[in-house]
């Protein structure tokens, strides 16, 4: 009785890379952590750097700092689908290497910028050609077995969130030791180490011709066609996750000032409160990802949206800053279950040959929310009052839960 052995060329991408995904996950977690540390550590000293570059008035410093910080996220939102599509065509590892090397070079150039316009342009370029965390999501989201994808994406999300949490803390210390420009060079060095680890340690079994043949074969298979409305609901939810988290940023300092915090402590307390949501997410991201593997991603998404929406409302009624911080930790704990579960569903919504592009669109939606959140939150605070930001954002999250519940029936 003869045994038929399936050729690796005829296995799916996830099956061919089953022996590599755990090691690749470890490298991607490290790379996502270091790159996001490098991108976020400029927050404490960005206004100082803008002033060094020749901007004098306080209003202009604030305006240019906001533009420079948002430029990276805008760039990533624009190009993430393109890099996802190229990952489907040429492989996931080349996209990781491209992102790491590109960001290391651009970070070094930011350290020698001579004007605020160059700073903004380079931050935008970092988003356009970078996106290591986005490329990591594409790789791990397509390599991990479907029954472990939620847990793997949760671990990856934990590394990225930890980078966003540690970045401002490191950025508050390094300039005093090595100067502002030296801090950018240190960030570039960290990303270069991540690039080296990616080149040496990340393994991928990718066959462009096989992927092209699979795409042609499945293009006419109705069973693999994505439901456009379901995909749209997932993208809208991904955008809402970051929008909800970032909506408070424009008003946080003023809001905390109204809670009795003295002027010399407002900035420091505001930084702590903003970090609290990331801290909460670090605590639960992997656990909620694993929960999605057990009870289903749809259940986790709906539950987390409802809980996050509810957690937003009490933030409008706090009387002490620590109460706001505790509620932001709680909100971060529920937010953490959303992105890994959404990514897992997005992977399943399309054929394997288009999964990278789909996850690229998902990353674009997330960064769009990160750009839109502060803008919308600021406008709501101006026109409707500071407390209204929490009411509106919480209501949007609950409406999004209803949308996802409807999409689930599709």
Image (cartoon, rainbow, N blue to C red):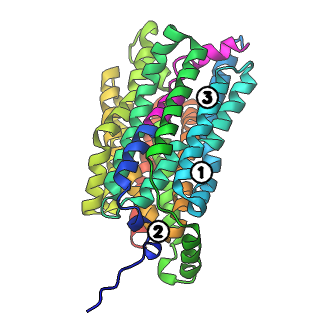
Residue toward you, 288 or 132:
132
Q: Is residue 163 left or right of residue 155?
A: right
Residue 207 is inside the magenta segment:
no
Q: Is residue 7 left or right of residue 119?
A: left
x 38%, y 34%: residue: 162
Q: CA distance from mark 3 to mark 1?
A: 19 Å
Q: Quadrant of the N terminus?
A: bottom left
What residue is pinned by disc 2? 349
Tell me where residue 368 appears, x and y as whole percent.
58, 46
Tell me the tag on residue 165. Answer: none
Look at the magenta stretch and give its main secondary structure. helix
Tell me the tag on residue 80. Answer: 1
x 57%, y 51%: residue: 94
Magenta region, residue range: 33-54
Marked residue nearer the N-terminal end (3 or 1): 1
The answer to whether residue 6 is seen in the rendering is yes
- Circle 1 Cα neighbour tier, 10 Å, few/some/many (<14 / 14–19 / ≥20): many
Tell me where residue 173 appears, x and y as whole percent.
45, 13
Q: Splitting the image into 4 quarters, where does residue 297 fall?
A: bottom left
């Amino acid at each position: 009785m003869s045994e038929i052995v399936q050729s690796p060329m005829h296995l799916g991408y996830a099956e061919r890379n089953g022996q590599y995904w755990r090691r690749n996950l470890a490298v991607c977690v490290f790379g996502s952590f270091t790159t996001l540390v490098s991108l976020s550590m400029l927050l404490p000293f960005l206004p100082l750097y803008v002033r060094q570059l020749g901007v004098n008035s306080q209003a202009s410093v604030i305006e240019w700092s906001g533009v420079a910080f948002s430029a990276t996220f805008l760039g990533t939102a624009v190009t993430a689908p393109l890099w996802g599509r190229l990952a489907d065509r040429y492989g996931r590892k080349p996209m990781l290497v491209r992102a790491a090397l590109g960001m290391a070079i651009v970070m070094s150039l930011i350290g020698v910028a001579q004007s605020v316009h160059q700073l903004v342009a380079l931050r935008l370029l970092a988003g356009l050609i970078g996106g290591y965390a986005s490329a990591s999501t594409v790789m791990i989201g397509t390599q991990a077995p479907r029954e472990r994808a939620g847990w793997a994406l949760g671990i990856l999300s934990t590394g990225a969130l930890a980078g966003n949490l540690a970045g401002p803390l490191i950025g508050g210390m390094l300039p005093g030791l090595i100067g502002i420009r030296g801090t950018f060079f240190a960030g570039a060095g960290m990303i270069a180490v991540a690039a080296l680890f990616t080149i040496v340690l990340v393994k991928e079994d990718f066959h462009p011709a096989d992927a092209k043949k699979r795409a042609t074969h499945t293009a006419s298979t109705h069973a693999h066609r994505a439901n456009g409305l379901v995909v749209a609901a997932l993208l809208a939810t991904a955008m809402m996750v970051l929008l909800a988290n970032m909506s408070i940023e424009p008003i946080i300092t003023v809001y905390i000032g109204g809670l009795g915090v003295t002027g010399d402590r407002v900035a420091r307390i505001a930084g702590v409160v903003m970090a609290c949501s990331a801290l909460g997410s670090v605590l639960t991201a992997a656990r909620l990802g694993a929960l999605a593997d057990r009870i289903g991603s749809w259940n986790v998404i709906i539950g987390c949206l409802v809980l996050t929406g509810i957690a937003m409302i009490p933030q409008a009624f706090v009387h002490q800053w620590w109460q706001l911080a505790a509620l932001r930790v709680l909100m971060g704990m529920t937010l953490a279950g959303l992105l890994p579960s959404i990514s897992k569903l997005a992977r399943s919504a399309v054929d394997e040959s288009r999964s990278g592009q789909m996850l690229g669109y998902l990353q674009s939606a997330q960064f769009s929310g990160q750009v839109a959140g502060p803008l919308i939150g600021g406008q709501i605070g101006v026109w409707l009052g500071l407390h209204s930001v929490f009411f509106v954002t919480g209501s949007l999250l609950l409406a999004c839960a209803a949308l996802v519940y409807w999409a689930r029936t599709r």
